[in-house]
Amino acid sequence: MNTKQRIALFGNFGSQNIGNECTLDAARLNLAKVVPDAELFCIAQEPSVASALHGLRAVAIDQAPAARREPNGPSTGFIARLWA
């Protein structure tokens, strides 16, 4: 079975700090070359801004601690909500 990779990029994105935004862009562009079929999303300080600037789905950093995986079960928390 061939499943699509999902890659999360975590950082202070969406803050419109040029260094952070360039880092996300560089990661996004290089990942597109290396794993072109992967689904990329980011965990960002300002998810709506990061999404608009970079064209990625985004969730807020403060939602990240809610993510967990039950033993032998599905993901719950923000990751499950993002991909639902």
Image (cartoon, rainbow, N blue to C red):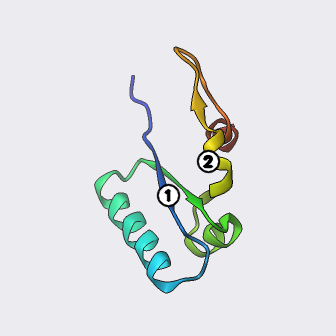
Question: Residue at coordinates 50% horizontally, 58% vertically from top-left?
Answer: 10
Q: Among all residues in the image, which is located at the extreme left?
A: 34
Question: Residue at coordinates 43% horizontally, 31% vertically from top-left?
Answer: 3
* Real-space CA distance between mark 2 and mark 1, rounded to the nearest whole angstrom: 10 Å
Crowd class of label 2 (few under 14; some 14 to 19; many from 20; radius 10 Å): some
Q: Which of 71 and 35 is in front in this view?
A: 71
Disc 1 designates what residue?
10
Direction from residue 77 to residue 29 in the image, left or right:
left
Question: Residue at coordinates 61% horizontally, 38% vertically from top-left?
Answer: 67
> The N terminus is located in which quarter?
top left
Direction from residue 71 to residue 28 in the image, left or right:
left
> The C terminus is located in which quarter?
top right
Vertically, is 16 above or below 29? below
Residue 79, image x, y percentages: 61, 40
Q: Do the residues labelled 2 and 1 touch (CB within 8 Å)?
A: yes
The three-letter amino acid code for the residue at tag 2 is: Ala
Task: Report which quarter residue 69 is drawn in.
Answer: top right
- Identify the mark at residue 64; answer none if there is no mark: 2
Q: How many labels does the image show?
A: 2
Q: Is any part of residue 6 visible from this angle? A: yes
Q: Is mark 1 on a helix, strand or loop?
A: strand
Question: Residue at coordinates 55% horizontally, 57% vertically from top-left?
Answer: 42
